[in-house]
Amino acid sequence: MLKDKIEQALNDQIRIEAESSQIYLAMASWAETEGLGGAAQFLYRHSDEERMHMLKIVQYVNERGGKAIIPALSAPEKNYKSLTNLFQTLLSHEIMVSGEINNLVEICLNEKDYTTHNFMQWYVAEQIEEEALARTIMDKLRMIGEDKGGLYLFDRDIESISIAQNTTQK
Ligand code: OFO
């Protein structure tokens, strides 16, 4: 049985993962309408992965005798100044998520819930991968700058990059 504090913290994390999925879906749609088909595909996949992260927690809460709450979500930003601006927003968002996951892990330790602590380790590892990938993408975009040819190649290459490739288990 989950303690109330843990159940609350996990439900907060369900909302964060659901919001991440919505934000990346809106980013994907923006990229698609800007003719950035490769970035759009990358972001659609990213959005799906965030939904999977949410689902894992929903099922974990319910399996442990708690009640997962499917939250209402606020409308995500729909316009970005550029692809660089979009990926900077994505990186900042992932840094925020990592902080929230660390808080959740700390709550698990304080409440001596080692099962949930163990469950959360997958998320800790996932955040390292996601932040690293977002930083690599930002480095590339900084290098490209205003170069249209560079942006064309970037958009072509990013289509085949997946966060899932970098993580060991899903
Ligand atoms: Fe759920 O990993 Fe990003 O936010």
Image (cartoon, grey):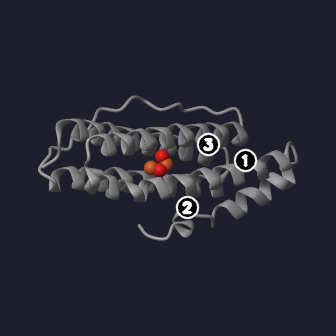
The residue lying at 84 percent from left, 49 percent from top is: 144
Residue 156 percent across, percent down from the top left: 72, 62
User: Looking at numbered disc 3 in the image, what kind of residue is underneath it?
Assistant: Leu
What number is the disc on residue 78? none
Say whether mark 2 is within 8 Å of ligand 1. yes
| Residue tagged 3 | 91
Of callouts 1 and 2, the N-terminal one: 1
Pointer 3: residues within 10 angstroms few (<14), some, or many (20+)? Answer: many
Residue 166 percent across, percent down from the top left: 57, 67
Whether residue 48 is visible to the viewer of this picture, yes or no, is no
Tell me whether circle 3 and circle 1 mark residues in contact (CB < 8 Å): yes
| Residue tagged 2 | 163
In which quarter of the view is residue 12 placed? top left
Instruction: Give the spatial CA distance, label 1 vs label 2.
Output: 15 Å
Above or below residue 162? Residue 55 is above
User: Looking at numbered disc 1 in the image, what kind of residue is underneath it?
Assistant: Met
Q: Nearer the viewer, residue 51 or 29?
A: 51
Q: Nearer the viewer, residue 130 or 4?
A: 4
Tell me whether circle 1 and circle 2 mark residues in contact (CB < 8 Å): no
User: Looking at numbered disc 2 in the image, what kind of residue is underneath it?
Assistant: Ile
Instruction: Give the spatial CA distance, label 2 vs label 3.
Output: 13 Å
The residue lying at 33 percent from left, 52 percent from top is: 117
Of callouts 3 and 1, the N-terminal one: 3
What number is the disc on residue 138? 1
